[in-house]
Amino acid sequence: MSVANVQPAAALDCANAMSTPDLNACSEIEYKTADADLNAAYRKALAEIAKTDLEAPHDPKSFEAAFRKSQRAWVAWRDAECEGLMPMFMGGGSATTGAILGCLTEKTQARAKEISERLTPPW
């Protein structure tokens, strides 16, 4: 999701943003930060999974495959929830983009926390 005519991040004062384009741009920045944090948690979890010495069917390869499958399913759910359902609640309008981005950010932050807590040894 990209916001047209987004000002460079340095030019935005997100603490005092008032216009819809600025609010949307700030929401997009917040979502991108959350997404980067999620990707970092995901990579760290994969590295921890690779270090496990469990035996089949809980061996590192099977563990990684299950984790990747779970993450793909979670992304599909998050996107359907935020990009598909949120516009229905909003009824369209200028606040929809910000609501979608807020939903994506909230769920992405929660998932990053969940991954960090659940997939940090010891299990």
Image: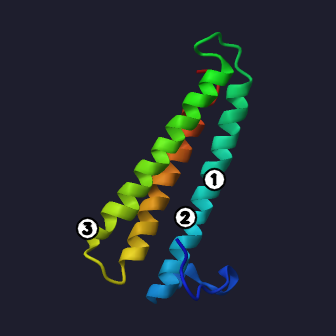
What is the spatial separation of the Cα atoms under label 2 and label 1, in whole angstroms? 10 Å
Horizontal side of residue 24 vs 88, given as left or right: right
In the rendered structure, which amino acid carries the disc numbered 3? Phe
Residue 34: % across, % down: 58, 58
Q: Which residue is mark 1?
A: 37
Circle 3 packing at 10 Å, graded few (<14), some (14-19), many (20+), is few
Viewer-side label of 2, 3 = 3
Residue 72: % across, % down: 52, 43
| Mark with earlier residue (2, 1) | 2
At x 51%, y 72%, the residue is: 27
| Secondary element at image label 2 | helix
Identify the mark at residue 31; answer none if there is no mark: 2
Identify the mark at residue 89; answer none if there is no mark: 3
Q: Quadrant of residue 122?
A: top right
Can residue 17 be seen here? The reply is no
At x 68%, y 34%, the residue is: 46
